[in-house]
Amino acid sequence: MSCFEAYDPAFGRFVMGNAPLKQLATGFDWVEGPVWFGDAGCLLFSDIPDNKILRYTPGVGVSTFRAPSHYANGHSRDRQGRLVSCEHGLRRVTRTELDGRITVIADSYQGKPLNSPNDVVVKSDGSIWFTDPHYGIMSNYEGFAAKQELPCNVYRVDLDGSIEAVLTDFNCPNGLAFSPDEATLYVADTRRMFHSDPQHIRSFSMASGRPKGGAVFHTITPGCSDGIRCDTDGNLWSSAGDGVHCIAADGHLMGKILVPETVSNLCFGGRAKHQLFITATTSLYAITLNRVGAQTP
Ligand code: MG
C-alpha cells in the first residue's frame, strides 16, 4: 500500500489509494536520471558509481543499455526524441543519434573543462539547458577526482552549438525543469559538497528568453531537490529525503509520496505519462498517479 501525506486537499485527487508504490528493481549503487522512451516501451536510468546506463522494460526487467556510461547522470530527450546525457567521467553533455553515434554537445566553456554535468532539459526551441555542479569531480566515486576550473553554472547550448552561462550565482545547481508553458525555469540548488549552504528550488521568469529573477520558490525538507519534473497543470514534483514532494505553481507543498529510500530523480512515463518513475538510492520505483507528465516528447 502506498503511503501519502496530503497538505492540500487537492492532492487527494492526484494520487490513488489503491495504486501501490512498486519497487521495480534493486541492488544498485546509486541510481539517477530516469528518462522514458514510449516508442521503445522502456525507461533508461543511470547507476552512476557502477558506470552504467540501465534499461527497465515493464514485464521484462532490467538490462544494460550502455557500459561504460562514462559515469552518466541525468538524461533527457530532445524534440527529435534523441537521448541527451550528462556524463561525469568525460565531463560533457552528449546526444545519442538515431544511428547510435555519440555527438558531443558541450565539454568546455571559455577554454576550460566543464565540472561534471548533472541534469539536462531541452526547450521547445531545441536549446539544451544543463547544470554543472562539481559533485562528479570531488571524488572518484561518481567519476574521476579532478581540479575544478569553472564555477558551478547553468548553461544553455544553442542549435548552432554556442554555449552560454545563463546562471552563475548558484552554489551547486542540480535538478532543473521548465514549466509546461516554458514561462518559468526551475533550478534546484543542492549545496557544495562538505558545505552547509542553503538547499532550495529557485524560479526564473523566461519572458525575455533568458532566465531572470531567481527568487527562492520552495525549500525542500528533508533532503534536497536533486531532480524535478512538472505535470501538465504546472505542479512541480521533486525528489526529497523522505520521498517525492508535490509543489504547486505558487510554491506551497501539496503532498508527499513517501518512499523508503532517499529519492534522487524522477520522471513521468508509461502509456499516458501517468506513471511516476522514481530513482531512489539503490532501487527503482514506480507509482501510478492521476496526473500526466509535462515533459516532452
Ligand atoms: Mg542531479
Image (cartoon, helix red, strand yellow):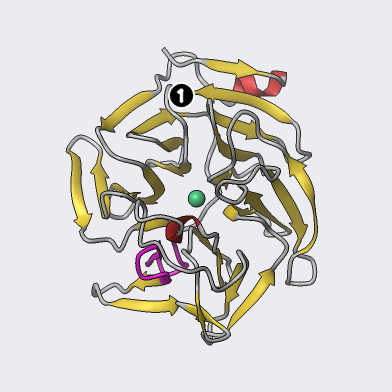
All told, the count of numbered labels is 1
Question: Residue sitting at 61 percent across and 22 percent down?
Answer: 13
155 or 196, nearer to the observer: 196
Viewer-closest of 100 and 188: 188
Q: Where does residue 76 sit, x and y in percent of width and height?
A: 44, 59
Within the image, what quadrant is residue 281 found in?
top left
Vertical side of 204 occupied by 159: above or below: below
What residue is rendered at 28% in x and 47% in y? Answer: 42
Residue 256 percent location from the top left of the image: 59, 24
Q: Is residue 113 magenta?
A: no
Q: Say above or below: 197 vs 165.
A: above
Residue 21's x, y, as percent?
A: 40, 23
Membership of 79 in magenta stretch: yes
Q: Which residues are magenta?
A: 75-93
Residue 99: quadrant of the picture: bottom left
* Residue in the picture at 66% in, 42% down: 196
Left or right of 268? Residue 123 is right
Vertical placement of residue 168 versus 103, above or below: above
Determine which residue is flagged by label 1. Answer: 259
